[in-house]
Image (cartoon, rainbow, N blue to C red):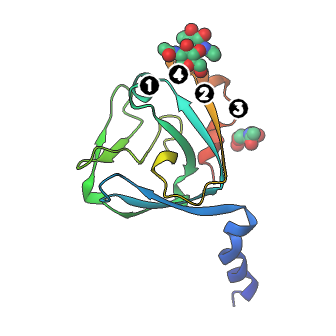
Amino acid sequence: MVPLSFFFLAACTPFFTGLVKHTGGCHCGAVRFEVWASADLHIFDCNCSICKKKQNKHFIVPASRFKLLKGADSITTYTFNTHKAQHTFCKRCGVQSFYSPRSNPGGFGIAPHCLDEGTVRSVVVEEFNGSDWEKAMKEHKTIKNMSKE
Ligand SMILES: *[C@@H]1O[C@H](CO)[C@@H](O)[C@H](O)[C@H]1NC(C)=O
Ligand SMILES: *[C@@H]1O[C@H](CO)[C@@H](O)[C@H](O)[C@H]1NC(C)=O
Ligand SMILES: *[C@@H]1O[C@H](CO)[C@@H](O)[C@H](O)[C@H]1NC(C)=O
């Protein structure tokens, strides 16, 4: 028999780990998601060729902490170069509210500016030198870990 404490732990894990549930989506409302992350967000401001044009600020979470609530049919995906990053965006309003970054193909990059209000306590913005992507990745100590469970 599974001990009761197991269910208690499973239900309370987000509280123990200090995560909160953020919700968000695109502009027209077709795409909606929820994501468990800290209330204190660590945001990357990348300037690789596409991030620069999109002003793509994002925080990174493991895939298991992200859930698409609606809009799978409304999402289209742009890829280029290595085709590792999946630049998903709403095909109706054009807003990229989340995507799968080249740095963390096993996770998601969430646009903090697409979250609903009320769950973010603080933000730290770190510049990521995407204009020299390989070097920046090699030198960065923690970005790869951000999509690990
Ligand atoms: C990209 O950002 C870095 C800082 O992270 C800066 O040193 C570099 O000049 C920027 N490159 C371009 C092309 O904007
Ligand atoms: C970012 O990369 C560019 C291009 O290689 C380089 O000129 C610049 O010095 C780098 N900036 C930082 C802060 O490392
Ligand atoms: C990141 O993950 C690697 C490999 O799992 C580990 O060796 C390293 O200590 C982690 N770094 C941090 C800052 O958690």
Crowding around mark 1 (Cα neighbors within 10 Å: few <14, some 14 to 19, many 20+) is some
Task: Estimate the spatial distance between the alpha carbons at disc 1 and disc 2, rounded to whole Å.
Answer: 11 Å
Residue 23: where, in percent of width, then height? 49, 61
Q: Quadrant of residue 137?
A: top right
Is there a contact, CB below 8 Å, between mark 1 and mark 3? no
Task: Estimate the spatial distance between the alpha carbons at disc 3 and disc 2, rounded to whole Å.
Answer: 14 Å
Q: Is mark 2 within 8 Å of ligand 1?
A: yes
Q: Is residue 114 visible?
A: yes
Give the number of the disc on residue 4: none
Q: Does label 1 or label 4 sit earlier along the sequence?
A: 1
Task: Estimate the spatial distance between the alpha carbons at disc 4 and disc 3, rounded to whole Å.
Answer: 14 Å
Task: Estimate the spatial distance between the alpha carbons at disc 1 and disc 3, rounded to whole Å.
Answer: 22 Å
Is there a contact, CB below 8 Å, between mark 1 and mark 2? no
In the displayed structure, 43 sits above or below 63; it is above
Residue that mark 1 sits on: 52
Q: Is mark 3 within 8 Å of ligand 3?
A: yes
Residue 35: where, in percent of width, then height? 53, 59
Q: Does label 1 or label 2 sit earlier along the sequence?
A: 1
In the displayed structure, 139 sits above or below 16; it is above
Task: Estimate the spatial distance between the alpha carbons at disc 2 and disc 4, rounded to whole Å.
Answer: 12 Å
Q: Nearer the viewer, mark 2 or mark 4?
A: 2
Task: Estimate the spatial distance between the alpha carbons at disc 1 and disc 4, rounded to whole Å.
Answer: 12 Å
**Looking at numbered disc 3 in the image, what kind of residue is underneath it?**
Lys
Q: Quadrant of residue 13?
A: bottom right
Q: Does label 1 or label 3 sit earlier along the sequence?
A: 1
Q: What secondary structure is found at the residue carrying circle 2?
A: strand
Q: Nearer the viewer, mark 1 or mark 4?
A: 1
